[in-house]
Structures are given as structure tokens and as C-alpha cells.
Image: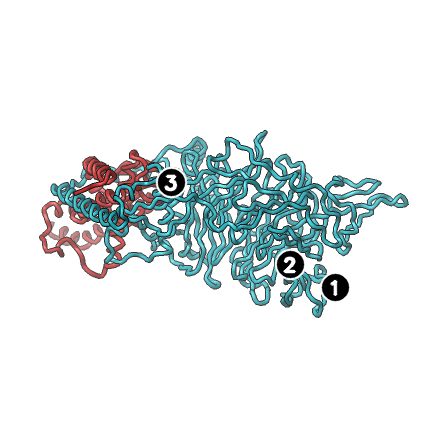
Chain colours: A cyan, B red
Amino acid sequence: MTTPFRRRHHDDESAHDRARALTATEMLEPLDEIQTVWLAGHLEGCAECRNDREAYLADRALLRSLRDATPEPPRDLRARTMAALDRESLARSKRGRAAGRTAGRPLSSHRRPQLPFGAAAGALIVLVVVGATFLPQLVPNRGPESTPGGSDFAFGSPDLQATAFPVPAVDDVGWVQPGLDGHWELVLADVTSLCPRTRPSCQPLGEDQPSRIVELGSKPHGVTISPTETQLVVETQGQGSAPGKIFVVSLPPEPDSPTPAPTDSTVAPTTTPGETAAPTVVPPTVVPPTAAPGTAEPPTAEPSQVAISPLPTTDVPRGAVEIASGVTVVGETLYSPDGAWLAFSARPSDGSRGPDLYLWHVGEPTAIAVTDDHATYFSTWLDGRILASRVEPVVLVADPGTSPGVADATPEASPATSADATPEASPATTADATGGPTNVGHPMSFLLDPATLTRATIEQPDVWLPVVDPSGKFAAFWSGTVSRATEVDDWQPAEGSLVLSPWSDGTTAAPTSPAPTDDATASPDESPAAAPALGPVGNHTELVPGPVAAFRTNFDPTGSRLAVWVGDTIDGDVGRLHLVVLDPSTGGVDESVAPLPGVPALRRFSIDRGRLAWVTPSGQDGQDSSVQVLGWSGNEFGEMHGIPAKQMYLVR
Amino acid sequence: MTRTWEQDAARTFVDALFNKHQHEIFAYLVRMLRDPELAADLTQDAFVKAYKNYDTLEKDENARAWLYQIAHRVALDELRRRKIIRMIPWSGEARGAAPSAERLAMDLRLSGPLERALASIPERQRAALLLAELHDLTGLELAAAMGVSHVAARAILTRARESLRRALAAEQDAERAAELERDSHYGPQARSER
């Protein structure tokens, strides 16, 4: 199956929508210079938008005429309010005395916060916001019998008239967006109600969701949230002499109760936010990667030599822990499912070398490089282990009797025969008569235990960046060779295709093949009777034919949906996102359902229970990005569109 | 009665808030709920809640937006309750009192096309319009009052302006239709009398 690229952009409509939004915003607060210029230009050529603007202004004048008839409060309002405050004050005193007696100490010492008052008040505000975020999921709407005092900070339910498609079991979506004054806002939005795809008007995603302020420095390149929601990992890219960085920012812990106690039970968080379930595993003793049988010589450099030390810098927010500096993340940054580890691959910010695999043990001061071949790419986590790929450059064998350039580049040939493929060999960009590495390579994938650094190699070559479904029976990966990019020391897919394949964990029988479509990519010595080795088995189903510049795939927790992102360029973040519907029992693709045939999307999408979320790229005319959600219940699909903003980082 | 220093500070602060903002909070609640008596009750509730939750106010300079946040939630809670019990007729008269002159005057003020249009748009959008245009909240204050991000607040306000525009157009259409109907009934009669 091949998922086609289709464009379904409505640029004109978007421009008018943007003009309306800016017109409305302009009436609230000044626009920035870019917005002002864009709006003026658009209004000049759009009579309809000029009419909209005039109508808004007329309505505003009409609205403001209501100021002439401002209602006056009844004369007894003061007396009754003061009486109510007296009653409440008295009640609090009684409750306080009772609590003081119970605790055996005076009320004031019990209630007085240990933190500075401002900090305690700030923490409470955060608790309010966090509580309000999760309240709709945890607490049903109060009935008419609920007391006014009990709903002080309960947010109202969304405007239900704008949504019509309930999604009973769906995970929330999280993103970071810019606020004012250089702050960033983290929004965790529930998407339990989605718009039918046929309805053009819908309540924007996140409209009803509170946000919390987070300090992420000047401009992140990527943001990742920990599974326990206690940390954000922020990636920045180096600019000029400033190195790229990776740092960790603590988030306030989720409160036990989503609403603060309305009375005098001051609940000030006294613990420092952090991972409470940090394992007691000793940080990894860095050892050179174990050479799998039949592979090239292991790197000789001690990984500790490339471990990155934290350097205090001004663009890292106060309180953040800088775990790496001078590097640029390549691909994904993912926590292990238990939140104890963070894995990513990164290369030097100056592009002088290719990427290595890094691990950060939560709580440790720095991330540590656990490879030094400069050609290892993190793919994903699989059962607590890291699934990664590395590249073995094809080496030209010098043969004085023939013309240079006899490449030993067939996939069937073990990369082990392409000896001298160590990083020290400094792969040449072109072959010469004496032989040497070429710009073509064979990817090899492996599993790595983060605690012991022991590897399990996937013997089948040309498996690049595999992602395995939750059942462990199927995997999506690039099946083919890779080639070296010219701009940076990086590798990208070359000959081959993006495929879906049955997968074996090496211990249990692999499932049957889905649909026999491409025998050429099947494992040559496949035997149903043989004990399946770790890795792909059987025939592949082609998802996207090569060549592709970059890709990313991920399954939903049920294994019945596969999201496929295909990038426009190797190191760019813009591409197209597809959703493939699978039969989890057979791994076959249901081609009759194409809920998302390819929409413009940034690389970091998020697929979880019942929904796929992504961020649209900003337009060339300055159009902002927005979070989009496609949700489903069975084979019924609905959408939710977020509010545009200049930069958005999907974190969940 | 023994009070702690926090209670004293809270009470003093809320008393001052009441003196300064009672009129605008009451006006906001009247415009949201279209019921002055209920608005008075809820204004009282809002200030009591402000007292109870004084600890959640981070900075004194944010007090106005914080107070509007409390009033806004009180209003939304009330509107939600109304939806839940909407099958049961409820009005001020049900309390056993005849409508006051103040109530009648307010009813007159709240019965124009603009008020009807405002009443027909979603509550949160109505709140955003009222807070921004009649109560002069800034974008940040609006976000705080509505308990949403700044971006979301602006988006709600944009949608509110569009909703109001459509609602006003519908009101005009309805008035025009009513005029035509009147003409069709009384026009021939008037002409024949002439």
C-alpha cells in the first residue's frame, strides 16, 4: 500500500480567518509590527474583510452604549455581604480552633506557610491551574445541589453546542505555546469531544483549558514531557557561538485534589518537584558498545570522553538542569515508559560529526554518550530497552587490476565483510582508487539495555529506525540502504521503502505475514519452521515507496492505528502525516479506510489512545501554527483544531 | 472571636476590594445572568469566595482580574445549574415576591435587540465581550478572568465578535419580518380607513 500525498489546504480561507482574528485582536490590544503590516496589506485587497472590520467596530460601539445603562447594586448589598463575610470569618475561626486543638498546637503556626508567602501563593495558583486542568476528567459536573463554596475553582464545561462527537476513551493532548512577556504556556487539553469532520465550525482545541506558565528560555527547538508530568526536557539549537543545549525543567507535581480547599486548609507544596519513582539503579558505567558477532570492530574511544559536561549559561532558565551542551538532537527525545531514563541521539552543533546515542538517567547531572561511532540513531523504547540503528558505510575494495569503485554494497553481504568501517576511518565523501567508505551504508538495528548497556543485535541488515507495535508482533521501519547527506554528517533513506512487517522478539513464534506484496524485501532465508530471530520476519507491506528524505512512525496503544510522517527534507521539520488503519490480529492494512491521507505537519506528532495530534507548519505568509487532533471511536473519526500561535511544541 | 493574622489581612483586603469593585462585579453578573436579584446574591457569594481563597491571590495588582475570575466562575456555575434545572420554571417571582420596580426597569433595559443578541451567544463568548468591551479588561486580565491562556482568550473574543455579528443580523431579520407581518395585517385596513 502506498499512502499518496494530497494537498487540502484552503489558503484563501485561512487568510480571511486570520484577518478576522487580527481585526478582533486589534480591538483588544495592539498587534505586533508584522501582524499590523500583514493585516493592512490584506485589508487593502479584501473588501469582505474590510466589511467585517467595519461591522466589528459598529458592534463594539453598540456594545459600549450599554455603559450608559450600568446597573446599580441594591442598597443593601454592602450590609448583607459584610454580614456574610462576618459569618464566614467566624466559621473559619471555629474550624481553626478545632484544628488547632486536634493538632495540639495553635492554628496560626499550623497554617502559616513554611515557604515565603509569595512562593506559597504562587504554588497555590499553580495547584489551582493544575487542578482545573484535570478536574473535568475526574469530577462530573456538579448538580444543582452542590454548594457554592464547593465549586470555587471548578471550570465550566465546554460550550457543548459547538461539539457533537464524544470520544469516550481518549488521552489528552499537550503542547507548549508562547505567552506574553517571554513566558511559555503549557496546555494539557482533554479531547473527549470532537467535531464531526463535516462541520466546518468547531470549538477550538484548548479554548476551555487553563494553562500553566513554564520557563523554557528564549526559543526551544523541541520540548518533551516526562510520563509522570514532573519534567519538561527542552532542546535548543546552537546559534552563532552559542551552543545547542538540552536542559530539564521541573513542573509542579500534580495535586492530589484538583481543587484547592476553599477554606483555611492551606496546602502548600513543600517538596521539590521531581521524579518520585527514580530507580535506584546505579548510573550506567560507560563501556564501549559490545561488538555483536559478525559486525565491525567496536569503537575504541571511551564513551566517557564524549560525555558532555553542564556549563552554566544565561539562556538556560533558573532552576533548570542542563544535561547536555554543544549538541543538536537528531530525531526523537523520549523518556522510557517508567520515566527513569531519557534517550536521544545527538550530533555536535557544528555538524562536524554524525550522531551518537545519549542516555540520561533521571536525577543525574548530565546525559552520557553511550556510543562513539557517530552514526547511531535512537528510534524508540521497546519493553524498557532502547531500539536504535547504526550505519555501516559501504567500503570500496581497492583492486589494482580493475577500475576503482567496485563496491561491496549488496544488502545480502554482511556488513562485517565491509571491514574497517570504524568511525576512525573517517569515511570519504568519494571513493578513490585505494578504496574506502562511500556515501552509501547499510543500517543495522539493535536493542540496548540502558542499565547494563548490553546489546541484542537484529541480524537482518537494512532495518532502519524500526518501531514495534505494543503487542510486539509488528514493526514499521525503513527497509533498504541509507545514504550520507551532503549538508551535514547525517544519513537518510536511500534505496528501499518504508514497510510494515511481522516482528519476532526472538523468543516467541512470530505472526503470519500480513499481505504478500513485496517478495524482494523479504528475508531471503525465511523458514516458517525455524526459530525466529529477533527482528522482522516474513513479507513486508510497503507503506511508502522510496526515496523519502526523512520519516517517523508510531503505533497507537491498541496497535490498530499507525501514524506515518514523511519529511520534505532530511533535517527539516516539515512533512506530511498519514494515519494507517490496521487489523491488529493480522497486521494487515485496511485500505478502505484512509482517515488522514497526508496533511502538512511538523515532525513531532503524538499518537495515543483514541487520537492523533500534530502541529501544522507555519505558512510562508506568516500564518501561525496550530495543534490539530484527529480522534476516533471505532472507525468514526472527528477533529479538533487548536488556536493558532507563532510557535507550538507538541509534548503529548 | 480570635482571628489569625492571615484572616485579618484577608478580611481587610476583601473589604477594600468590595468598596472598590462591587459596582462593576454586580453589573457584570447582571449582564451575564439578566437577573438583578440573583446577580446581587452572586455578588455577595463572589466576595465571600474571594475571602475564602485570598491565599490564591499571587499579587495584589492582579486583584481585579482575580475577582472577575471568581465572579465569572460563579456566573458559569449558575448558568450551568440553570441548564440542569431548565425544565423547572424559575424566576424571581417564584420566591414569593412581586417583581420590584428595579427589576421591571432592568427588564426593560435588557430587552433590546442587542441584549437579546448577547443572550443568544454562548456564555463564555458573552463573558469575553462584556469583560473586554464594558469592563475594560486587558488581554492578560481577560485570560486570567476566564482561566484560560492569553491566546485562548483572544480566540474566544474573536469568536464572540463573530457570533454577536450573526446574532445581531438575525435580530434585524426578525424585526424586519415582524414589520412585514404587521404591514400585511394592518396595511390594508389602514389604507381602507383612509
Q: Is residue A438 left or right of residue A237?
A: right
Badge 3 element:
helix
- Between label 2 and label 3, give the one nearer the viewer: 3
Counting from the top left corner in percent of width and height, residue B154 is at 37, 41
Chain label for disc 3: B
Badge 2 element:
strand
Chain label for disc 2: A
Tell me the quadrant of the picture where the N terminus of chain A can be found.
bottom right
Of the pair B132 and A273, the residue shown nearer to us: A273
* Amino acid type, residue under disc 3 in the picture: His
Q: Is residue A295 above or below residue A63?
A: below
Q: CA distance from mark 3 to mark 1?
A: 60 Å
Chain label for disc 1: A
Q: How many marks?
A: 3
Counting from the top left corner in percent of width and height, residue B62 is at 30, 36
**Residue that mark 1 sits on:** A525
* Amino acid type, residue under disc 1 in the picture: Asp
At a point 74% along the width and 54% down the height, the residue shown is: A293
- CB under 8 Å between callouts 2 and 3? no
Q: Establish whether labels 1 and 2 are both on one chain.
A: yes
- Looking at the image, which residue sits at the far front? A104
At a point 71% along the width and 57% down the height, the residue shown is: A459
At a point 90% along the width and 45% down the height, the residue shown is: A401
**Residue that mark 3 sits on:** B150
**Residue that mark 2 sits on:** A542
